[in-house]
Amino acid sequence: MLDGFAPASVHNNPKARREWAVQQLHWAAKASKNLGLTEHATFSGALAQPFLYPFPQRPAGLVEEAFDELARRWTPILNAFDENGVDVGYELHPGEDLFDGVTFEMFLDRVKNHPRANILYDPSHMVLQQLDYLDFIDIYHERIKLFHVKDAEFNPSGRRGVYSGYQSWINRAGRFRSLGDGRVDFASIFSKMAQYDFAGWAVLEWECAIKHPEDGARRR
């Protein structure tokens, strides 16, 4: 499923694809420095995702080993970003190993609180997980270096919940919405960001299962 992110030359070859991806990150660190940028957005990867829901019970140590391996892979990359004066902001995403505060802390502990290991804050992914996105800012504001302004809603019923039965985005309980059409309290989020002197950009990320992007842009 990840081949679509990479060139055809490394398709169906996980080792070659990984080497290509690592090289891209090293180049991104240098490119960010050359462009005068101080933050870089990325995902963590998903070694443990197939074992998210523990049934049958996971073998003891499996998740720990997955996070150990994640740290082994990322530490040299974090060092490269440090050499270039750039923070890495992991977008906490339900499809990645780093998807909430607990998993970020698990990773941070393994990279020895690396100063370049930080967070891209996106409340829409937290709505889908039913996570308190305002409390999150209070807890992790020192590590939040990037900010996606993306709306979402969560509409559970007697037939669908967080997992939503493998349905399309339009039929899921949790879905992304055009800014202003969802339920994210951005007024409170911006107040929190101001309270903690967030110095970065508020980057609008549009994604909606219902509205056309041009209609969303006209409204905002």
Image (cartoon, rainbow, N blue to C red):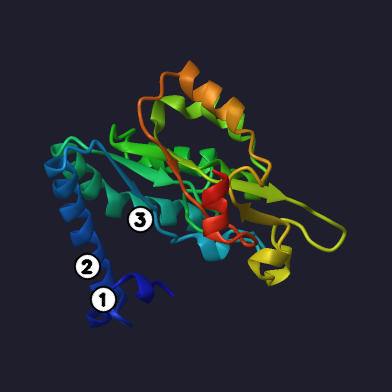
**Of the numbered discs in the image, which one, if any, rests on residue 20?**
2
Closer to the eye: label 1 or 3: 1
* Distance of label 1 from label 3 (alpha carbons): 25 Å
Q: Is residue 167 above or below residue 29?
A: below
Would you identify the image quadrant in which residue 172 lies?
bottom right
Q: CA distance from mark 2 to mark 1?
A: 9 Å
Residue 83 is at least partly visible in this image:
yes
Disc on the earlier residue, 1 or 3: 1
Q: Which residue is mark 1?
A: 7
The quarter of the picture where the N terminus appears is bottom left
- Relative to residue 117, is residue 178 depicted above or below? below
Residue at (52% x, 61% y) in the render: 49
- Identified by mark 1, the residue type is Pro
Q: In the figure, residue 208 lies in which quadrant?
A: bottom right
Residue 98 image point, x, y percent: 47, 48
Of the pair 29 and 213, the residue shown nearer to us: 213
